[in-house]
């Protein structure tokens, strides 16, 4: 292990990890750290005061349980066996150690470390703070792929409870800057590991029920799960629409407003034509009741030039890209609008092309919503993609449908 090397322990990275680990052990204020899915807001999962600090920093409702992050199967086995005797103990009545249920073995072998969270029974005498599980008798756990995340857990020598490190209801953070934007003044340290690769959260699966179920679509797709023994008939235990008041979601987090920028999000389900999308945008821009002054379009397709989208010009050709560094932004007017009249502000449109492959779309989605929020857009129009059952595209559409709330547009 590289951290066993004395010279490397003197690097700024090692010092930052040591500082973060020290805070995790002693402070009740959580520490933000990168994972391969999104940035997490971590606290020692065994200390109530520390876990309460997460809910406080995020302003998260406390009936929404947290995912526990471990660095190794060894750490998880210790969690499952809180009062088990140490190997040197002379105890003669040795009870068998609790193991990860059989059903999960193929998943753990194949997808850990990685973006998969499994639901396990919380053992009696559990060391987990009750705030981690809310009132549930189970807990969710994953081993992140990010080496930095695992190293942090290893050095802290504690399982870390960690939700996404955004303010509650906001899009999840995929960079350290996103975390800073939402939580500065509320936390003391953010470990910056660069942009998260996957861009959407882990898939949450429940193998304790028959047949097993996906509780949240995410980084691991349905087909990959189905190819594992025991998971051929895995069901979808979530849905994207607004929930019935009387319906109790199986993953409690799925019932809250989520992933929402300040701007209103209008989602076009896949199959909408480019012309149809443009027509809707044009109509909204000219509708004073909607009062949109500044809009963003998040595209997942190439738009042909020359489509006559606005009365006087071509919307596709007047869109301007959103640069990744916002300070270099050039604003521009949408043609066909009155300019400079005292009653009407100049109307602006911003273009954000996510790319067309699902991985790029997942990777850039939350950053796009956040960038357009920084630009103070009133409405963000998003081109949806075809979601196969429970794959990465389903994770993308799940997040988008929640961001759009009831406003689903066909
Ligand atoms: O990728 C991820 O999973 C990220 C990174 C930071 O690891 N974490 C994350 O955590 O997304 P959070 O707290 O934002 O989402 C946790 C989800 C929620 O939908 C919650 O309801 C569900 O997992 N969950 C946690 N424990 C559960 C349990 N015992 N039973 C059912 N669902 C559970
Ligand atoms: Mg979250």
Image: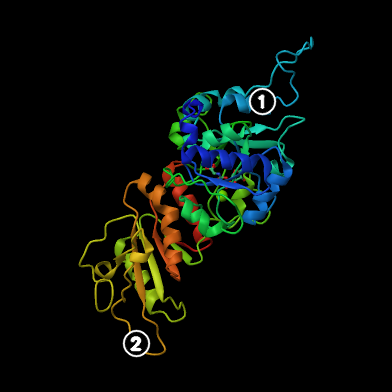
Horizontal and vertical percent position of residue 132 = 68, 42
Q: Is residue 277 visible?
A: no
**Left-right relation of 65 to 385:** right
Depth check, front residue: 89 or 321: 89
In the drawing, what numbered circle is on residue 78?
Answer: 1
Label 1 near ligand 1 (CB < 8 Å): no
Q: Which residue is mark 2?
A: 340
Question: Which residue does the image show at 27% across and 70% down from the upper left?
Answer: 318
Q: How many marks?
A: 2
Placement of 69 over or under 358, stated as above or below: above
Describe the element under mark 2 as helix, strand or loop.
loop
Figure colour scheme: rainbow
Horizontal and vertical percent position of residue 146 = 47, 37
Horizontal and vertical percent position of residue 335 = 28, 78
**Left-right relation of 344 to 330:** right
Placement of 387 over or under 405, stated as above or below: above
Depth check, front residue: 356 or 142: 142
At label 2, counting other C-alpha atoms closer than 10 Å, the crowd grade (few under 14, some 14-19, many 20 or more) is few
Describe the element under mark 1 as helix, strand or loop.
helix
In the drawing, what numbered circle is on residue 245?
Answer: none
Placement of 28 over or under 225, stated as above or below: below
Question: Which residue does the image show at 72% across and 13% down from the upper left?
Answer: 88
Q: Please report whichever mark, 1 or 2, sits nearer to the chain's N-terminal start.
A: 1
Question: Which residue does the image show at 41% across and 79% down from the upper left?
Answer: 287
Horizontal and vertical percent position of residue 124 = 76, 30
Q: Quadrant of the C terminus?
A: bottom left
């Amino acid at each position: 292990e590289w951290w066993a090397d004395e010279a490397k322990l003197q690097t700024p990275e090692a010092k930052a990890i040591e500082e973060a680990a020290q805070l995790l052990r002693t402070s009740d204020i959580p520490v933000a750290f990168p994972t391969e899915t999104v940035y997490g807001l971590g606290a020692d999962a065994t200390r109530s005061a520390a876990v309460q600090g997460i809910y406080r920093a995020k302003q998260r409702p406390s009936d929404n349980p947290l995912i526990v992050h471990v660095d190794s199967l060894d750490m998880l086995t210790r969690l499952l066996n809180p009062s088990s005797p140490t190997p040197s103990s002379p105890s003669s009545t040795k009870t068998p150690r609790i193991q990860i249920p059989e059903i999960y073995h193929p998943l753990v072998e194949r997808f850990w470390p990685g973006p998969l969270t499994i639901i396990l029974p919380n053992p009696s005498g559990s060391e987990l703070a009750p705030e981690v599980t809310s009132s549930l008798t189970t807990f969710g756990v994953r081993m992140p792929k990010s080496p930095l995340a695992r190293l942090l857990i290893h050095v802290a020598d504690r399982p870390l409870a960690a939700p996404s490190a955004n303010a509650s209801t906001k899009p999840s953070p995929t960079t350290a800057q996103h975390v800073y934007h939402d939580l500065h003044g509320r936390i003391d340290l953010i470990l910056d590991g660069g942009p998260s690769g996957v861009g959407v959260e882990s898939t949450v699966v429940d193998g304790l029920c028959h047949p097993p179920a996906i509780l949240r679509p995410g980084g691991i797709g349905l087909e990959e799960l189905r190819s594992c023994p025991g998971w051929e008939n895995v069901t979808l235990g979530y849905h994207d629409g607004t929930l019935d008041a009387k319906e109790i979601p199986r993953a409690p987090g799925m019932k809250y407003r989520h992933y929402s920028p300040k701007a209103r999000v209008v989602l076009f389900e896949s199959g909408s034509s480019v012309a149809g999308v443009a027509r809707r945008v044009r109509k909204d821009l000219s509708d004073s009741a909607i009062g949109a002054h500044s809009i963003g379009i998040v595209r997942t397709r190439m738009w042909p030039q020359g489509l006559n989208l606005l009365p006087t010009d071509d919307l596709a050709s007047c869109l301007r890209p959103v640069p990744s560094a916002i300070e270099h932004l050039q604003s521009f007017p949408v043609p066909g609008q009155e300019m400079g009249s005292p009653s009407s502000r100049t109307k602006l449109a911003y273009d954000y092309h996510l790319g067309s492959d699902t991985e790029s779309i997942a990777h850039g989605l939350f950053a796009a919503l956040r960038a357009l929020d920084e630009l103070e857009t009133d409405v963000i129009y998003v081109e949806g993609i075809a979601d196969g059952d429970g794959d990465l595209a389903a994770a993308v559409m799940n997040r988008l449908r929640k961001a759009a709330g009831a406003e689903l547009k066909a």
